[in-house]
């Protein structure tokens, strides 16, 4: 599956890679020469089809099941992946679930479920992976956050909290693990249309038109996040420690009340006190 060879010889585990961004990242790593362990929680369809695609192209891949509501399974996954791969060079901590609900209606069970999967499981999967990486003397951990960590959206109080927690966790973990040869960073992904979203949008949805609300002018794809992950996993990013790279087409860079950013401004500010206006 060789588009390149930046990850040749690397052994990579991508959690939550049965669908969406995770699956796309796993395929991108394989295209760059990595051997890949894919993880799914419930349906194996997407993960197994990705494994088959990678193998057809001459790559090495296997799918592993783990329910991240169970922290024991989250800890065991990197161990199983390392056994298959013969070690573990990169963990992409992508698995996560979302929910939108009015703040006053959120139940403790819903709150616990999102934090268990999005934060607790990520924490202990990273812990387990780090043990293997420390023994090897090197490794990279990439945690997947979201633009929700930096900008508010109605009815996403629980989800946004988990994604913001990942940013803080990443920063602190990076300072501790770099001393052991492990680089830790994060990616805050923006709008990427994945299977669950496509199942909910109307048939007349105009993706091209919708993309114009973003400064980039288009909605992102899983491979866009995958290319950033590959960069962070590579030696090219050796001086990047504990950072969260925002990959969102400029969404969080745009002021909400700024108006249509594609049209030149008509109001002139500074008249009378700034020369030339």
Image: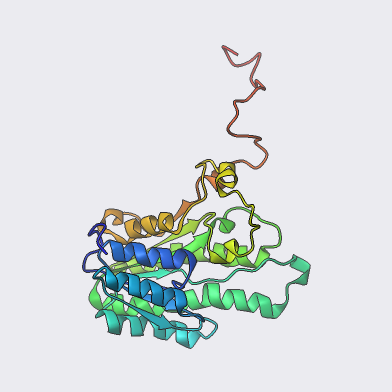
Tell me if residue 159 can be seen: yes
In percent of width and height, residue 189 lies at 50, 57
Tell me what residue is drawn at x 44 percent, y 62 percent: 171
Query: Residue 271's image quarter?
Result: top right
Task: Residue at 31%, 55% (x, y): give it.
Answer: 237
Q: Is residue 108 above or below residue 103?
A: below
Q: Is residue 78 left or right of residue 263?
A: left
Residue drawn 46% across the image and 55% down it: 221
Q: Quadrant of the N terminus?
A: bottom left
Quadrant for the C terminus in the image: top right
**Does 266 sit above or below residue 20?**
above
Q: Quadrant of residue 90?
A: bottom left
Return the residue found at the far bottom.
72
Side of 156 relative to 241 (left or right): right
Residue at the spot 40% in from the left edge and 86% down from the top edge: 76
Using the rendered view, name the quadrant where residue 10 is placed: bottom left
* Residue 11 appears in view: no
Farthest residue toward the front?
203
Please tell me which residue lies in front, 148 or 37. Answer: 37
The one nearer the camera, 247 or 243, is 247
Q: How is the image coloured?
A: rainbow
Q: Describe residue 262's horizontal placement relative to residue 14 as left or right.
A: right
In the rendered image of this protein, does residue 179 appear above or below residue 72?
above
Residue 105: x and y, percent?
Answer: 77, 71
Residue toward you, 262 or 236: 262
Q: Residue 74 location, x and y as percent?
A: 46, 82
């Amino acid at each position: 599956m060789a588009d390149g060879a930046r990850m040749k010889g690397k052994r990579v585990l991508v959690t939550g890679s049965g669908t969406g961004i995770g699956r796309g990242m796993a395929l991108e790593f394989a295209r760059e020469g990595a051997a890949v362990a894919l993880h799914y929680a419930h349906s194996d369809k997407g993960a197994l089809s990705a494994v088959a695609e990678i193998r057809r192209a001459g790559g090495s891949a296997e799918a592993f099941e783990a329910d991240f509501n169970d922290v024991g399974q989250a800890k065991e996954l990197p161990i199983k992946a390392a056994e298959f791969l013969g070690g573990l060079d990169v963990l992409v901590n992508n698995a996560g679930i979302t929910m939108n609900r009015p703040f006053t209606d959120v139940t403790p069970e819903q709150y616990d479920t999102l934090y268990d999967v999005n934060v607790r499981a990520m924490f202990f999967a990273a812990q387990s992976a780090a043990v293997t990486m420390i023994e090897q003397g090197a490794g990279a951990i990439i945690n997947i956050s979201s633009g929700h960590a930096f900008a508010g959206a109605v009815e996403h109080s629980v989800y946004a909290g988990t994604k913001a927690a990942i940013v803080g966790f990443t920063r602190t973990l990076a300072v501790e693990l770099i001393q052991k040869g492990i680089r830790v960073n994060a990616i805050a992904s923006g709008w990427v249309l994945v299977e669950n979203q496509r199942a909910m949008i109307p048939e007349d949805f105009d993706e091209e038109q919708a993309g114009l609300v973003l400064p980039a002018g288009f909605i992102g794809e899983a491979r866009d996040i995958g290319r950033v992950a590959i960069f962070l996993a590579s030696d090219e990013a050796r001086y990047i420690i504990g950072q969260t790279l925002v990959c969102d087409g400029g969404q969080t860079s745009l002021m909400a009340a700024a108006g249509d950013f594609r049209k030149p401004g008509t109001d002139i500010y500074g008249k009378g006190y700034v020369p030339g206006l």
